[in-house]
Amino acid sequence: MDIIYLQQVRASTVLGWYDWERTQSQVVELDLEIGLPSARACVSDHLNDTIDYDKVVTQIRQDLTAKHFLLLEALAEHIANIVLNDFGAPWIKVSVTKLGILQEVARVGVTIERGQRA
Ligand SMILES: Nc1nc2c(c(=O)[nH]1)N=C([C@H](O)[C@@H](O)CO)CN2
């Protein structure tokens, strides 16, 4: 399976279990590996034959500004569903990272995989 990857994508959303995290949005970092439904674009050299990563990032960023989540896990699931359902990817691996949220921990996050990896 061919894969598009996006690393350290910054997006803003309201996220957190505790009340103090829900008063304003925070920046999270996303790492995505997106399975492609076919390798057609490798031959055709045409954007219509693949998943446009520019559109993926734009849609995720827009979507997250209007949403709020309690857990990283729920946010990761939401992102996976966007890419699987709206962009037709057969498989996705999503990592969501919070930056500097815990004392003396630079980064904390979750990684999930959804769909079928061929
Ligand atoms: N497994 C998880 N554990 C925790 C989460 C989470 O999203 N998934 N979130 C928090 C708080 O929101 C944290 O960011 C601040 O203390 C705690 N544990």
Image (cartoon, rainbow, N blue to C red):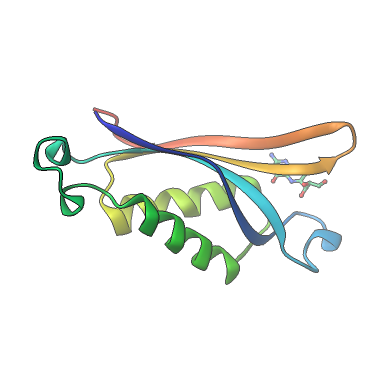
Q: Quadrant of residue 107?
A: top right
Position above or below: 61 against 1: below
> In the image as oriented, which residue stretches furthest toward the bottom?
66
| Relative to 22, 112 lies left or right | left
Position above or below: 43 against 78: above
For the point 69% across and 54% down, which residue is it? 27
> Which image quadrant shows ligand 1?
top right
> In the image as oriented, which residue stretches furthest toward the right?
103
Of residues 8 and 91, the one nearer the viewer is 8
Position above or below: 115 against 1: below
How far across and down, in percent of the image, does residue 80 sit? 43, 48
Q: Quadrant of the C terminus?
A: top left
| Relative to 60, 34 lies left or right | left
How far across and down, in percent of the image, does residue 23 sit? 80, 69
For the point 51% across and 67% down, which residue is it? 62
How far across and down, in percent of the image, does residue 1 sit? 24, 28
